[in-house]
Amino acid sequence: MNGWALLAAVLAGMAAWTAVRSQREVVSRASVAVVEPGRRPVPRWWSPRPEAMAPRSRVLLAVPVAGVVGLLVGGPWPLAGGLALLAAIAVVVVLGRIESPEHRRRREALLAAWPQTWELLACCVETGLPLSHACRAVAELPDNPAAEVLAGVVARIDVGMGQEEALLELREDPVVGRVVADLARGLRSGTGMTELLVEHAAEAREVHHAALQSAAKAVGVRSVLPLMLCYLPAFFLIGIVPVIGGAVAALLP
C-alpha cells in the first residue's frame, strides 16, 4: 500500500469512527428525548438499526475498504482521501442498516423456540402453578433460546415488579409483544391462561412454518447467481468462442 492509500485509510477510519459516535449520540438522544421544536429530525437512513453490526466491527470493515479505494484511485491525495472517506462512511452507514448475522441467528432460534415455550408454560399453568412460577420453571430449562427472555421477566418480578408490569416490559417485542399483552390482560381479568397459551403456541408454530417455507423459497433465488457463475464461463468457452474463432478464421486470408 502506498503512502497516499495509507493516509486515506487512516483519515477514512477516523471519519468512520466519528460517524459511528454521531450515530450513537443520535440513538441515545432519541431514546431519552423528543425532537426540539424547529429542529430538523435526523434522517432515518443515518440512524443504525438496533440489530445491526456492532460499531467497532463496522469501523474495522470500513478502514480496509477505504485503503483499497485510496490504492485504486491514486492520484492527488485530496482526491484519494476524499473518495476513501466517502467509501468508509458509506460502509458504516450501510452496515448500520443491515441485520447482523448474530442477531439473525438468534431471531431464527427464538422463532423456533417460542411454540414449545408457550406449550410448556401452558402445561405448568394447567398443573396449578402461578404464571411467575411457570416462567421461572421454563426459564431454567437448558438449550432453550427463549429462556433468556423469560429469565428477564423472572428477574423483574424478583426485584419487586408486578407480574403484569414485568410482562408488559416486552410489549414492544415484534414476536412476543401481542402474547405478553394478552397474558397481562388475562392477569387483570382473572381469565384462564392455559387456553390462551395453547392458542398462541399454535399461532407461533404457524409463523415458524411460514418462515421456514419463505427461507426455502429464497434458497432457489439465491442459488441463481452461483449457478450462472458456474455455467456461463463453460457456455462461453464451448458455445461462443468456437463460433467467433471460426468466423475470424474464415475472414482471414
Image: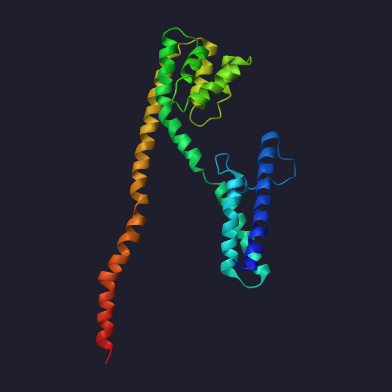
Query: Which image quadrant is residue 163 in?
Result: top right
Q: Is residue 213 left or right of residue 12?
A: left
Residue 196 visible: no
Compare residues 82 and 166 and report the one nearer the observer.
82
Q: Is residue 158 above or below residue 11?
A: above
Q: Position of residue 160 (x, y in %)?
A: 63, 14
Residue 220 visible: yes
Query: Which residue corresponds to the image point at 48% horizontal and 42% vertical from the top-left?
Result: 101
Query: Which residue corresponds to the image point at 34% horizontal and 54% vertical from the top-left?
Result: 224
Q: Position of residue 223 (x, y in %)?
A: 34, 52
Compare residues 247 and 33 and report the one nearer the observer.
247
Q: Position of residue 70 (x, y in %)?
A: 60, 65
Q: Is residue 16 left or right of residue 206?
A: right
Compare residues 149 and 40 and report the one nearer the observer.
149
Query: Which residue corresponds to the image point at 42% horizontal and 27% vertical from the top-left?
Result: 113
Q: How is the image coloured?
A: rainbow
Compare residues 121 and 210 and report the one nearer the observer.
121
Q: Which quadrant would the N terminus be assigned to in this image?
A: bottom right
Query: Which residue corresponds to the image point at 25% horizontal and 76% vertical from the top-left?
Result: 242
Q: Is residue 136 left or right of residue 221?
A: right
Q: Position of residue 120 (x, y in %)?
A: 41, 18
